[in-house]
Image (cartoon, rainbow, N blue to C red):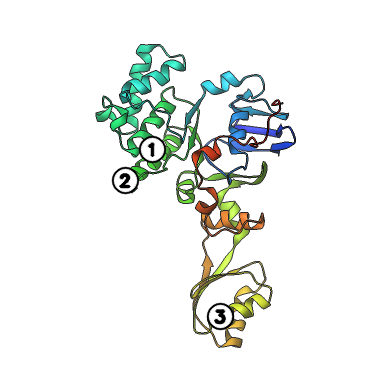
Amino acid sequence: MSEMVIKTNNLTKSYGNHIALDSLNLEVPKGATGLLGPNGAGKSTFLKTILGLIQATSGDGIVLGHDIRTEGEEIRTKIGYMPEYDALNPKMDAINQVRYSGEILGMHPTIAMTRAHKSLEYVGLGEQRYREIGSFSTGMKQATKLACAIIHDPELIIADEPSNGLDARAREFMLNTLEVTVNQGQRSVLMASHLMEDVERVCDRIILLHKGKLAAQGKIEDLKAIDKEIEIHVWKNANQLEQHLSAKGLSVRREGRIMRISAEMDNITHEILQSASAVGAQVRRMHEYEASLEDLFIVIMERLGYEVKSSEQLLASPVQARQADIPKDYSGVIN
């Protein structure tokens, strides 16, 4: 099978005059990839299209070696989906909920029950398998949804906000389980989350969608190169130094006495020290700033015209708002 789990060519989806996906050209290799984008970016439409649940308006795509236009059913048998929304029956015990998930995928009941035991053990719920789901904590419910997603040993797991609402201990276990699934289980994960730390922990690549278009894709480490900065710790006359650097055309991000200056200019350290001398500022520390995925996300979104201080401001929104990307006023026939 190709090393590409998902590959699209000019994938477009329109609802009347509204373009939900605009000529997406994606290549998602095996491993763990984060799917990012603000509300309305096209993430839901993208997932529905690659799973063959809705037809693309134009363009094409291959998922796990299958054509998204004609082989949606085959694709879905190889996918495990862990939704963010509540998809469990609170009156069912965990073992039968997971068993049922296997049966609706076509498993023989005996095999589904055997696999349900193994899946719940894998996600840390072996001793709680006979408890009703209604008595579970949020972390236990999330783990049960993951068990439902992996019961048929899928090649690709789509995890939507897998650590949402979890305490520190449950969050750590969930992220570790996903890491083990990728690194030891040799399975692929497409993970949507508004928690940049979690995406960076599990994934080595990202896809960032914006208004139906591809804003960025690739290895996180490679993409960080677009935001190289020098961090300085300033004592005395910090305001004057910031103004002096900005007057030179340098991009300055500041938090109190800490400043991060874009490293795009040659001899940037010389320029910083020269400005500090000119205004009488003391630079106590200077080093190349190691950007995080959060920093990268903010930089990209700022370049796209958003004024945000954190990814959570932009990505955190009610579940209902992310259910679909169809405009509310759309009443025509879906093409």
Residue picked out by circle 3: 239
Task: Look at the numbered disc 3 and give the secondary structure of its residue.
Answer: helix
Q: Is residue 213 above or below residue 274?
A: above
Q: Which mark is residue 318?
A: none
Q: Is residue 107 above or below residue 221?
A: above
Residue drawn at the location 24% of the way across and 29% of the way down: 127
Which residue is farthest left?
127
**Residue 145 seen in render:** yes
Task: Look at the numbered disc 1 and give the secondary structure of its residue.
Answer: helix
Q: Is residue 274 left or right of residue 162?
A: right
Quarter the N terminus occupies: top right
Give the amino acid at mark 2: Arg
Q: Nearer the viewer, mark 1 or mark 3?
A: 3
Q: Residues within 10 Å of mark 1 (few under 14, many from 20)?
A: some
- Of labels 2 and 3, earlier in sequence is 2
Residue picked out by circle 1: 177
Q: Confirm or deny contact between disc 1 and disc 3 (CB under 8 A).
A: no
Residue 10 falls in which quadrant of the image?
A: top right
Give the Cα separation between the discs numbered 2 and 3.
42 Å
Give the amino acid at mark 1: Thr
| Percent coordinates x, y for residue 131 in the rendering | 26, 27
User: Looking at the image, which is closer to me, 17 or 57?
Assistant: 17
User: Looking at the image, which is closer to me, 171 or 287?
Assistant: 171
Task: Look at the numbered disc 2 and give the secondary structure of its residue.
Answer: helix
Residue picked out by circle 2: 169
- Of labels 1 and 3, earlier in sequence is 1
| Percent coordinates x, y for residue 193 in the rendering | 49, 44
- Of labels 2 and 1, earlier in sequence is 2
